[in-house]
Image (spheres, helix red, strand yellow):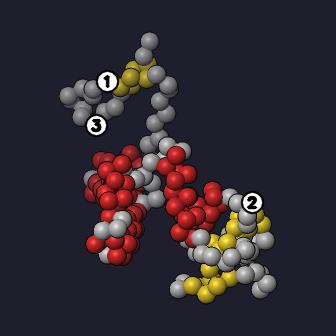
Amino acid sequence: MRVTDPKAETTKGHEGDTVVIKKYANRRLYNTATSAYVTLDDLAQMVRDGVDFVVYDAKSNEDLTRQILTQIIFEQENRGEALLPVKFLRQLIGYYGGQMQGVLPSYLEMSLAAFTRQQEEMRGQFHRTFGATPGAGLLEEAARRNVEMFTQAVRMWPGLAAFRRLRIQVPPGTRWRRPRPRNPFALSARPSG
């Protein structure tokens, strides 16, 4: 999403370039890095993609970043994608003008950073345990061990060596019945019908 155009307006941020978004009087948002108008949804996607940006009023050059980010949250909440519980919102409003107003922003920032770190650690642990899809790595490992044990069993007992060469073709709908007690290795099939 970031364009490395030398003419594009960017400012130096803590983690590299920060894209400058200008808000015009007609409430349109202009991305100076891509030379295109953007929507709040586009800005929300930039946040999700980790693109750092600031929003300035095109006329007064006032920093509007906080208001635009709050507006994005408001839009997301109105779409039914509620992330903030009502109780939390009430408590947050209660902190305005109080003694904790100066401390709360840094506390919330640290809490979200810790939450994000824990989420990444859990995601990494899940991936190491289960593979790309839930349960895949664990099941693959169990299947591989079962095949190894069966292969070792076939090598250890000469009577089972026939299974390596045996290719049984069973017609669809065949039901298996128990082998007779006199020959425990006998397999027999009987067509269902």
Q: Is residue 176 left or right of residue 53?
A: left
Q: Are marks 3 and 2 in contact (CB under 8 Å)?
A: no
Q: Which residue is mark 3?
A: 185
Mark 2 is surrounded, within 10 Å at the Cα level, by few (under 14), some (14 to 19) or many (20 or more) other residues, namely few
Furthest-top residue in this view? 193
Q: On residue 177, which mark appears?
A: 1
Q: Residue at x 68, y 82 (%)?
A: 10
Report the disc number at residue 61.
none
State the residue in front, 75 or 16.
75
Residue 65: x %, y % from top left: 57, 71
Viewer-nearest of labels 3 and 2? 2
Q: Which residue is mark 2?
A: 26
For the C terminus, give its image quadrant. Answer: top left
The answer to whether residue 155 is seen in the rendering is: no
Which of these two is toward me, 141 or 25?
Answer: 25
Would you call the spot at circle 3 few (<14 residues within 10 Å), some (14-19), or many (20 or more)? few
Q: Amino acid under label 3? A: Phe
Relative to 123, is 86 above or below? above
Disc 2/disc 1 C-alpha distance (Å) = 80 Å
Q: Which of disc 2 and disc 3 is earlier in sequence?
A: 2
Q: Answer yes or no: do the residues labelled 2 and 1 have beta carbons within 8 Å?
A: no
Of labels 2 and 1, earlier in sequence is 2
The amino acid type found where label 2 is placed reads: Asn
Viewed as shown, does residue 172 lie left or right of 176? right
Q: Which percent across, then down, holds residue 46?
A: 61, 66
Percent from the top left, x then y, of residue 52?
A: 58, 75
